[in-house]
Image: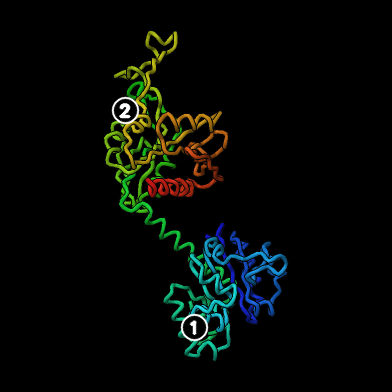
Amino acid sequence: MLKGKKIVLGITGSIAAYKACLIIRGLIKAGAEVQVVITPAGKEFITPITLSALTQKPVISDFFSQRDGTWHSHVALGLWADAMLIAPCTASTLGKMANGVADNMLITTYLSMKAPVFIAPAMDLDMYRHPSTQQNMERLKSFGNQIIEPASGFLASGLEGKGRMEEPENIVAFLDKWFSETTLNYQLSTLNSKRILITAGPTYEKIDPVRFIGNYSSGKMGFALAEECARRGAEVTLVAGPVALSTTHPAIHRINVESCSEMYDAATKAFPEQDAAILCAAVADFRPEHAAEQKIKREAPQSDDGLTLHLVPNPDIAAALGRMKRDGQVLVGFALETNDEAANAQRKLEKKNLDFIVLNSLQNKGTCFRSDDNQISIISHTGQQDYERKPKQEVAADIIDQLANYLKTS
């Protein structure tokens, strides 16, 4: 969960400063972007050139650049970062942080930090055990800072290892775990008390009692969306065409239908009470005008000339819900295209009064019907976002992230 995260790494004057290189390598390997802020004493143990080579960013140490007088804004760093990690953190820096002694760039950055702060102490055992150090750490914890040390469960117990900086790989693992749990907890609450309508699967349009017009939809994408919404706290109404799938979450209320007309009736009846609807079903656009009451025999008189089916349009579920949509409701559509994909999806977005549309293309082999993977683009009124090929469960999370943003602002 560190991918894309912006981390300010503070380095202080400890013999463990050389381990900051390993921390940087671990963070960058996990996909994070790292900006180093080092104290003057820290530069006595490791050179900014080494750190800059690893981060591909100039190291910040002073308030002003010695070359051209450029001002380094600690406020801007506090707004830029997703987290601040101070490792190693000496007893001196702990005391300054706990008491607001802003006499260097690292402390002013800490005092301006809007993001969570993680501290990895580094000192000898006597300094660590001193009441003033313990008091400073407790004070920093009371401010909401996270203290990372061997006794935190990663390395040692009791006094063994106390004061020594936690190993770099464990520090990186601590941050990764924290972001993972924070992201999960956020996701699990993003749709609390929301009511979401989802259509899924194909529809079957009867020709006679044993034959129908249908498509290859398995319903996997729609069911993944239903499970993801329920996982995040929503009450889900799932209108499902004929598929061989089951639901697992108790917050999913399933309505089984077969034809487009049945899906239309269920969706239009449920929609007024919903906060959002996701129209993922592969609905037949046409149906036979008349369905035979008995099986059509090959030996029938007309068989010599072939069988002609007269098809009539099915009701347009997306258009109907688009007309019904009230302020505050969010309507999401799907478009499966074979050519001119983006243009066709954009027209559907506008015509059906959708908030955004999820585009699938049959050009992406192995990502549509019956597949466990999908590759989508999300098109809204403000632009297009393309995604990599992923399992449908992960695609569902991307789509629901977008939906949650719309519900938050609607």
Task: Assess whether mark 2 and mark 1 are in contact (beta carbons under 8 angstroms).
Answer: no
The colour mode here is rainbow
Give the residue type at disc 2: Ser
Is 35 situated left or right of 304 in this image? right
Looking at the image, residue 405 sits to the left or right of residue 321; the answer is right
Q: Which residue is mark 1?
A: 157
Q: Residues within 10 Å of mark 1 (few under 14, many from 20)?
A: few
Residue 40 vs 51, above or below: the answer is below
Up the image or down, 196 lies above or below 263; here it is below
- Looking at this view, is 298 or 228 the one in front? 228
**Residue at the front extreme, as displayed:** 69
Q: Position of residue 407 (x, y in %)?
A: 38, 47
197 vs 136: above or below? above
Query: Residue at left 39%, top 48%?
Result: 409
**Which of these two is toward me, 350 or 96?**
96
Disc 2 crowd, CA 10 A, few/some/many (<14, 14-19, 20+): some
Image location (x, y in percent) of residue 190? 38, 53
Q: Relative to residue 235, is residue 292 depicted above or below?
A: above
Give the residue type at disc 1: Ser
Residue 261, label in figure: 2
**Residue 292 in the image, given as x and y percentages of width and height:** 32, 18
Disc tally is: 2
Q: Quadrant of residue 339?
A: top right
Element on which disc 1 rests: loop
Which quarter of the rendering shows the C terminus?
A: top left
Point out which mark residue 180 bears: none
Q: Residue 365 appears at what percent x and percent y?
A: 57, 37
* Residue 45, quarter of picture: bottom right
Give the mark nearer the N terminus: 1 vs 2: 1
